[in-house]
Image (spheres, rainbow, N blue to C red):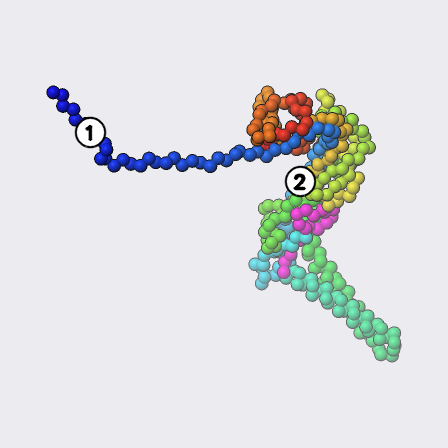
Amino acid sequence: MLLVTLTGCGKKKMDPLVEKKQEDYEKVTHSTAEVKRGDFPNKLTLTIGMEEITVTDYKFEERTIGELTARVVSEENAYIVPTAVAYVKEGDHVNVGDVMVEATIQNADKDLQEAEKNVNDLALELEHNRNLMEIDPDLGLSDVIRSGEEQLALARTRLRELQDQKTGVSLVAKEEGTVTFVDKALRDYGILDTYNPMVKITSGSGKYTVVTDDPYPFREGEVFPAYANDNVYDFKLAEIVDLGSGSKQLRLEPVSDISGLPDSQKLDMVVEKAPYKDVVYVNKNAVVRTENHAWVYIVDENGYREAREVVLGDTIEDSQIIESGLEGGEVISVE
């Protein structure tokens, strides 16, 4: 007899089936654009800048400041520290001879102000007495006037001495240019530094240049617009220098007033070339590139994409010219 033992399952409580959660279907959408066909403007943008840029550092010499302190500060005020005043800020245009920074000593400035006031007071008093003598010569003010003249002469001598004491403690521009640096401690607190530059001046030759190998037929005398800081300036092509192998250097002169531009400022000069005729073009972000190939994704009416290989022409700013592979009117994905 064969004894078979069966394990029953009818009485065992089964775990309920876990219901699979169904994810909501989301259709992938793409940003699209239409392939354009027609005439397309052709612009060449060149970045021009001033040649032979130099930067000059200006600082106070320790010896100069020491001599200033020695001849101005008395023994009882021997520990007074000279300070400075900056008359320029970054971006300012300076000419030769402009005072940019002046070292000052409080007592010296106070004495100078008092001497100037004394000269003015004595001059006014002398003028007053002279006017009285003209009105009434019998007042007998001749000695008073003579004494006033002597006092005024002495006061003017003293004033010149105090003014001479301040000579040689200024930073004076030795060339025309643009202020590109002012020491922060000087600017904010009047602190002198005899080790590091207080001011830096950037200067150029006044001639702007750029090198290009574009085949555009440049002609001397042509005027082109150039853009910087949302402003437009006109530049005339003064000279074309052939560098060989198709490259050339363009030397330009400003026609507009550019006195507000730093010498180090770069500008984008725009050359309007003959427009492209009857070309196909797309947003350059729609083109996918590899080392040897390029393609775009055509999007059909159902939103599906299909890759299509294309041959590229010139890239003009945000647009890409397509030489073959598209006819115009297609809808493509732009990523």
- Does 207 lie within the magenta span? no
Above-or-below relation of 62 to 13? below
Above-or-below relation of 300 to 88? above
Q: How many marks?
A: 2
Mark in the foreground, 1 or 2? 1
> Which residue is pictured at 79% across the width and 39% down the height?
255
Q: How far across and down, in percent of the image, does residue 291 sit?
A: 58, 22
Among numbered discs 1 and 2, the one appearing first in the sequence:
1
Q: Is residue 296 left or right of residue 255?
A: left
Q: How far across and down, in percent of the image, does residue 223 sit?
A: 80, 35
* Front-most of residues 323 and 173: 323
* Front-most of residues 31 and 9: 9
Secondary structure type for disc 2: strand
Residue 241 in sight in this render: no
Q: Tell me the magenta residue range.
A: 88-106
The quarter holding residue 9 reads: top left
Q: How far across and down, in percent of the image, does residue 165 sit?
A: 68, 56
Q: Residue most toward the bottom?
A: 138
Secondary structure type for disc 1: loop
Determine which residue is flagged by label 2. 55
Question: Callout 1, which amino acid?
Answer: Thr
Residue 55 in sight in this render: yes
Question: Callout 2, which amino acid?
Answer: Val
> Which residue is pictured at 19% across the width and 27% down the height?
6
Determine which residue is flagged by label 1. 7
* Front-most of residues 297 and 247: 297
> Which residue is pictured at 59% across the width and 55% down the height?
189
- Does 92 lie within the magenta span? yes
> Which residue is pictured at 79% across the width and 33% down the height?
237
Q: Residue most toward the left?
A: 1
Q: Residues within 10 Å of mark 1 (few under 14, many from 20)?
A: few
Tell me the quadrant of the picture where the C terminus can be found: top right
